[in-house]
Image (spheres, rainbow, N blue to C red):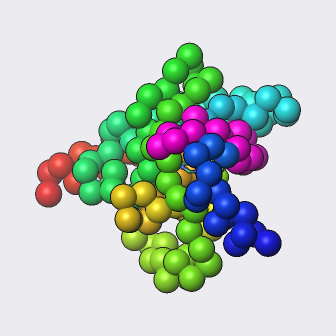
Amino acid sequence: MIDIKRKIQKHLPWFIKHGTTRIVFLIGPYALKVPNVFRWKCFLRGLLGNMDERLWFKNSPADWKLKMAPSYLCLFGGFVLIAGRAEPIDLEDYQELDIQSFHPLPMDKKLMNFGRYDSRIVLVDYADSRQFCSGCEQIFKCKKVVDLK
Ligand SMILES: Nc1ncnc2c1ncn2[C@@H]1O[C@H](COP(=O)(O)OP(=O)(O)O)[C@@H](O)[C@H]1O
Ligand SMILES: [Mg+2]
């Protein structure tokens, strides 16, 4: 059943997906991510998630960016994030995935948080609420280490 849904999603020009903290409108080549308005705490986390995702994408070195669906623009303090639309992956793709290779990006390693973008497997959700505060500082530290190499 889940597989059928994934296949349908691939072929529809628009589709709506629900995460815990965000609702995602898949429209053509874009994913518009808005905070989940149905629960206050989720809404707040959704705002932070949208802001953080853009921050991570903007500040990451090129090789990290290849592991993320692109986050192009974060509008209105996190109310809308415009990202590149990735295709859903299936269980086989997921089982072959080297999850460690996504380190140090923030990640909740569920299948639904990965997608295929430009024929690569990428994270579509890299806003892990456990890292809302520390993650931002960490990214700049890690970036410096990468730049110095
Ligand atoms: N860039 C994207 N391209 C395609 N699908 C996406 C994208 N971002 C999110 N999704 C879909 O929307 C779902 C919810 O988005 P997600 O970012 O995981 O929200 P949450 O932070 O609430 O978990 C994801 O599980 C995924 O299926
Ligand atoms: Mg998610």
Q: Residue at x 44, y 28 (%)?
A: 73
Query: Is-magenta flag for residue 43?
Result: no
54 w.r.t. 98: above or below: above
Residue 117, horizontal then vertical, whole percent: 42, 57
Q: Residue furthest left?
A: 149
Q: Residue at x 67, y 46 (%)?
A: 15
What secondary structure predominates along the stretch shown in magenta?
Answer: strand
Query: Split into 4 quadrants, where in the image is the C terminus?
Result: bottom left
Count every numbered label the image shows and give the total. Answer: 0
Q: Is residue 56 visible from the viewing direction of this image?
A: no
Residue 91, horizontal then vertical, whole percent: 62, 78
Q: Quadrant of residue 100?
A: bottom left
Q: Is residue 19 left or right of residue 124?
A: right
Residue 107, horizontal then vertical, whole percent: 55, 57
What span is in magenta? 16-32
Residue nearest the observer in this picture, 52 or 121: 121
Residue 23, horizontal then vertical, whole percent: 70, 39
Q: Quadrant of residue 95?
A: bottom right
Q: Residue at x 49, y 83 (%)?
A: 96
Q: Residue at x 72, y 70 (%)?
A: 4
Q: Is residue 121 left or right of residue 37?
A: left
